[in-house]
Image (tube, rainbow, N blue to C red):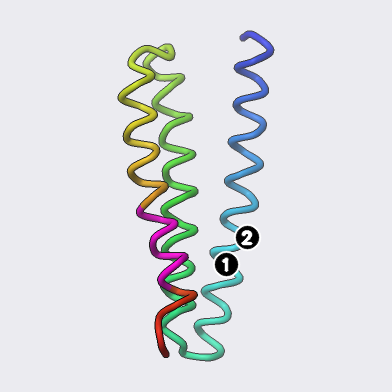
Amino acid sequence: MRVIEALYLVFSGTLAVAGLAMVGLAVRAYSRSGRASMMHLSLGFALVVAASLGTTVSAFATGFEGARTLLTVNYLITTAGYIFVMYSIVAPD
């Protein structure tokens, strides 16, 4: 494994841990407050984490072939996640 691949794994893992912590905090806030915006926030962060982990696993499984397709799917799922995050901020409760 090259250094760049190891760094990619480390940063993907860090993003996953931080993102899942945010999901957990948002779910806990939802269970305490019952605000739908907290559920939208947790869904958004979950999608961002799923995109990151899915891209990492797919990249190593395919030997980093098809990078354009991987990045396109990653950006699609990440964008959907951030739309949920933005909606959780602006949506009325």
On-image quarter of the N terminus: top right
Q: Determine whether label 2 and label 1 are within 8 Å by CB.
A: yes
Q: Secondary structure at mark 1?
A: helix
Q: Which residue position is annotated with label 2?
A: 21
Residue bounds of the magenta highlight: 80-87
- Name the residue at 44% across, 57% down: 82
Magenta stretch prevailing secondary structure: helix
Q: Position of residue 33 (x, y in %)?
A: 53, 91
**Within 10 angstroms of label 2, few (less than 14), some, or many (20 or more) residues?**
some
State the residue lying farthest toward the front.
Answer: 90
- Type of amino acid under label 2: Ala
Residue 25 placement: quadrant:
bottom right
Q: Position of residue 84 (x, y in %)?
A: 40, 64
Q: Secondary structure at mark 2?
A: helix
Q: Position of residue 81 (x, y in %)?
A: 41, 56
Check residue 28 for magenta coloring. no
Residue 6 horizontal side relative to residue 45, left or right? right
Q: Position of residue 77 (x, y in %)?
A: 35, 46
Distance from disc 2 to disc 1, alpha carbons, whole Å, reads: 5 Å
- Type of amino acid under label 1: Gly
Q: Which residue position is annotated with label 1?
A: 24
- In the rendered image of this protein, does residue 82 appear above or below residue 91? above
- Name the residue at 48% across, 67% down: 42
Which mark is drawn over residue 62? none
- In the rendered image of this protein, does residue 6 appear above or below residue 74? above
